[in-house]
């Protein structure tokens, strides 16, 4: 049995943020019915296509384990069907531009009237405030949520991270909100509204930077590379590759860095294992030297310390360094490329990287469920073709006959 077996989700999500959330629910066993516009469907089906006329990897990698129904929710018949689906589902999820569902005639009030038990979850760019009506994509959320102003190097521009913290991060929040609301419904019998703003989601993930903003008013941020020689302004600065915690860390070059852009390793020089680290890099002298043998003495010259560490790391590969430092309890991690991650056998074994077969594109790799439940194993199945399950869903859930479905199709409602 799967954890969310019996939960039916009416999935009006599109692009990335919403679909990642409902995909998680599908992986936990919910029946996720993706509602798409007839003819075109989710715009990502056609975006960044690598094979002509075939659903893109963008779409397939965000919509596993779902069923697809096409429905024109702006047509009268389509709206009737949509109302009936709301009646028969536990969850309605959407991430349209602000107000889109209201414009279709489905306000929260109306949705509740149709089904008081339903949980209605939305992702928007912003919560209530000056930007509440704006459309938002990933990088906009990163800029407005505090990620960009705090990422990059002090002498460079604000920088976007490749991790989709605005989209997939907020999708996670939405999934948690839905499951929590389902849990509360067990006791109250009532549904509720779940609202997740991408700005809030990014800021939540940048929590330590708001911590540093407040520390800044009490003095310089001593673990930042700006200390002690650079200048601090009135806002949390960009910290380069410095560690966000209390332990000094940096990315250092490894053997082959001149030709391999990912021949780097992150090394954390924490006090508990500093002795081992100093010995490993051949600087036993630091242990007797008051200029180096305490965290306080090292703090003003972390840059110099990592330069010394790098002299050693450039003589070895990132994997050799990992093999030496790990047994010494020196925290470190090789910078792994997407190619290396795709080929990593342990990630295949745990289902974190999965090969999926698709009727039109053949085999492709995807990221499986990152959350592992011992009583609810995830099997990743391919994303649906546009409208693949329209007839099945209309017959099975709404009890429509074939001729009724055919009539709806000829009038463009499905
Ligand atoms: N039948 C009929 N109409 C449909 C439909 C269906 N099945 N599905 C969608 N539509 C309509 C919507 O009702 C909307 O119509 P109106 O403009 O008349 O209200 C229209 O299609 C377009 O929807 P949209 O405005 O949401 O889409 P967009 O491409 O213009 O904007 C996005 C995309 C993502 C910027 C916007 O949806 C948004 O800001 N979403 C919230 C934030 C978010 O999730 N962003 C993450 C995006 S991933 O980076």
Image (tube, rainbow, N blue to C red):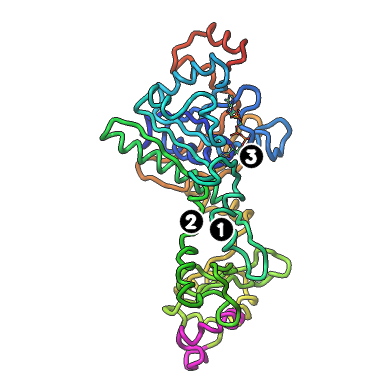
Q: Which image quadrant for residue 334?
A: bottom right
Callout 1: helix, strand or loop?
loop
Work out how far the residue at label 1 is from the one at label 2, CA to CA, in angstroms.
Answer: 8 Å
Q: With 384 as the anchor, is 10 left or right in this view?
A: left
Sooner in the amino-acid sequence: mark 1 or mark 2: 1
Residue 188 percent across, percent down from the top left:
27, 33
Dot 1 and dot 2 residues touching (CB under 8 Å): yes
Residue at point 58% right, 8% down?
407
Magenta segment boundaries in residue numbering: 284-307
Q: With 53 as the anchor, is 370 left or right in this view?
A: left
Q: Which residue is mark 2?
A: 205
Q: Which residue is mark 3?
A: 57
Q: Which quadrant is the N terminus positioned in?
A: top left
Residue at point 44% right, 36% down?
121
Residue 297 percent across, percent down from the top left:
49, 87
Callout 2: helix, strand or loop?
helix
Callout 3: helix, strand or loop?
helix
Sooner in the amino-acid sequence: mark 2 or mark 3: 3
Q: Which residue is mark 1?
A: 147
Label 3: few (<14), some (14–19) or many (≥20) C-alpha neighbours in 10 Å:
many
Work out how far the residue at label 3 is from the one at label 1, CA to CA, in angstroms.
Answer: 26 Å
Label 1: few (<14), some (14–19) or many (≥20) C-alpha neighbours in 10 Å:
many
Q: Nearer the viewer, residue 408 or 100?
A: 100
Q: Is residue 311 above or below residue 144?
A: below
């Amino acid at each position: 049995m799967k954890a969310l077996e019996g939960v039916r989700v009416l999935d009006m999500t599109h692009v990335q943020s919403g679909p990642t959330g409902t995909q998680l629910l599908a992986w936990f066993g919910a029946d996720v019915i993706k509602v798409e516009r007839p003819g075109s469907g989710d715009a990502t089906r056609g975006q960044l296509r690598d094979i002509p006329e075939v659903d893109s990897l963008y779409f397939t990698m965000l919509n596993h384990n779902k069923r697809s129904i096409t429905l024109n929710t702006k047509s009268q018949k389509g709206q009737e069907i949509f109302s009936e689906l709301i009646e028969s589902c536990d969850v309605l999820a959407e991430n349209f531009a602000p107000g889109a569902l209201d414009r279709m005639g489905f306000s929260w009030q109306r949705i509740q009237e149709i089904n008081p038990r339903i949980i209605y979850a939305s992702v928007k760019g912003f919560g209530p405030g000056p930007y509440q009506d704006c459309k938002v994509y990933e990088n906009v959320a990163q800029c407005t949520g505090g990620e960009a102003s705090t990422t990059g190097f002090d002498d460079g521009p604000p920088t976007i991270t490749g991790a989709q913290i605005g989209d997939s991060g907020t999708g996670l929040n939405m999934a948690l909100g839905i499951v929590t609301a389902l849990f509360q419904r067990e006791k109250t019998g009532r549904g509720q509204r779940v609202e997740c703003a991408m700005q809030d989601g990014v800021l939540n993930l940048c929590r330590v930077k708001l911590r540093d903003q407040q520390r800044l008013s009490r003095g310089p941020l001593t673990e930042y590379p700006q200390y002690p020689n650079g200048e601090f302004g009135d806002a949390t600065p960009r910290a380069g590759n410095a560690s966000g915690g209390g332990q000094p860390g940096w990315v250092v070059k490894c053997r082959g860095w001149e030709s391999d852009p990912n021949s780097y390793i992150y090394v954390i020089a924490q006090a508990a294992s500093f002795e081992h680290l100093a010995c490993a890099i051949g600087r036993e002298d630091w242990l007797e030297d008051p200029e180096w043998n305490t965290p306080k003495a090292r703090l003003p010259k972390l840059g110099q310390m990592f330069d010394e560490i790098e002299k050693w790391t450039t003589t070895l590969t990132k994997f050799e360094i990992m093999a030496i430092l790990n047994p010494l309890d020196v925290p470190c991690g090789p910078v792994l490329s997407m190619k290396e991650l795709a080929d990593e056998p342990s990630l295949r074994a745990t289902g974190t990287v999965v090969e999926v077969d698709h009727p039109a594109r053949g085999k492709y790799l995807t990221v499986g469920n990152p959350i592992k439940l011992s009583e609810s194993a995830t099997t990743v199945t391919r994303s649906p073709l546009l409208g693949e399950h329209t007839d099945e869903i209309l017959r099975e859930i709404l009890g429509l006959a074939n001729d009724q479905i055919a009539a709806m199709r000829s009038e463009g409602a499905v």
